[in-house]
């Protein structure tokens, strides 16, 4: 599992918030100007990180958002690695990113612990991989990849929990 980056988080968040399914600046700005104000902070940050600041500025020209973007751009240029200086909403957005990123890492550690416990149960003969598959309706290939190959992405956290409960 790759570590989530701020850019990746903003990309996904923009898709969730916008009425459009793509990340074209013109579509996102049209959505923003149509009243979707929640797009402002992630859009400003994403465009600046991508080097699309001039394009975004030209798309915002004459709107009420132009001044807000100008202020963000100036603060970002002076303090690119300090979201608290950018403003409260940017700090909150960054905190959300950290929460999602760290949750993924903690889930990864938890799945690894569950995998080790399951491997121990299978090796000791307490349960077979076949029984795990049939009882929980698991895909045999995914179970093999999870247990034997150590592919943590092959099994969801919920399925891993269900397997551990079955082994108890």
Image (cartoon, rainbow, N blue to C red):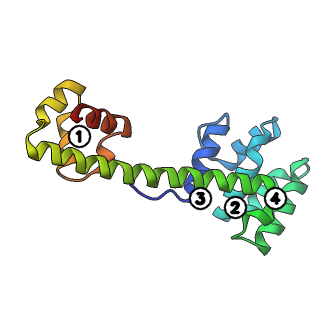
Secondary structure type for disc 1: helix
Disc 2 vs disc 3: which is toward the camera?
A: 3
Q: Residue 150's x, y, as percent?
A: 24, 53
Q: Is mark 2 on a helix, strand or loop?
A: loop
Asked if the residues shown at circle 2 and circle 4 are in contact, with their CB atoms under 8 angstroms apart, the answer is no
**Circle 4 sits on which residue?**
87
Circle 1 crowding by C-alpha within 10 Å: few under 14, some 14–19, many from 20 = some
- Which tag is nearer the camera, tag 2 or tag 1? 1
Q: Earlier in the sequence, mark 3 or mark 1?
A: 3
Instruction: Give x and y (percent) for residue 25.
Output: 69, 49
Whole-angstrom CA distance, mark 1 to mark 4, is: 44 Å
Residue 142: numbered disc: 1
Residue 146 visible, this angle: no
Q: How crowded is mark 3: few (under 14 residues within 10 Å), some or many (20 or more)?
A: some
The numbered disc on residue 6 is: 3
| CA separation in Å, label 3 and label 1 | 30 Å
Q: For mark 4, does the 10 Å Cα neighbourhood hold few (<14), some (14 to 19), or many (20 or more) residues? A: few
Task: State which tag comes first along the sequence, 2 or 4.
Answer: 2
Using the rendered view, name the quadrant where residue 53 is placed: bottom right
């Amino acid at each position: 599992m790759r570590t989530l980056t701020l850019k990746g988080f903003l990309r996904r968040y923009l898709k969730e918030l916008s009425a459009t399914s793509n990340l074209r600046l013109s579509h996102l700005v049209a959505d923003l100007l149509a009243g979707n104000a929640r797009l402002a902070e992630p859009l400003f940050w994403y465009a600046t990180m991508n080097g699309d600041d001039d394009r975004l500025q030209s798309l915002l020209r004459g709107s009420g958002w132009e001044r807000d973007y100008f202020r963000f751009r100036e603060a970002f240029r002076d303090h690119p690695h300090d979201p608290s200086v950018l403003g409260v909403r940017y700090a909150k957005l960054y905190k959300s990113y950290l929460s999602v990123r760290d949750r993924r890492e903690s889930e990864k550690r938890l799945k690894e612990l569950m995998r080790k416990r399951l491997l121990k149960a299978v090796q000791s003969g307490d349960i077979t991989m076949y029984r795990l598959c049939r009882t929980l309706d698991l895909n045999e290939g995914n179970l093999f990849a999870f247990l034997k190959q150590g592919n943590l992405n092959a099994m969801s956290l919920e399925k891993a929990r269900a397997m551990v409960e079955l082994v108890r």
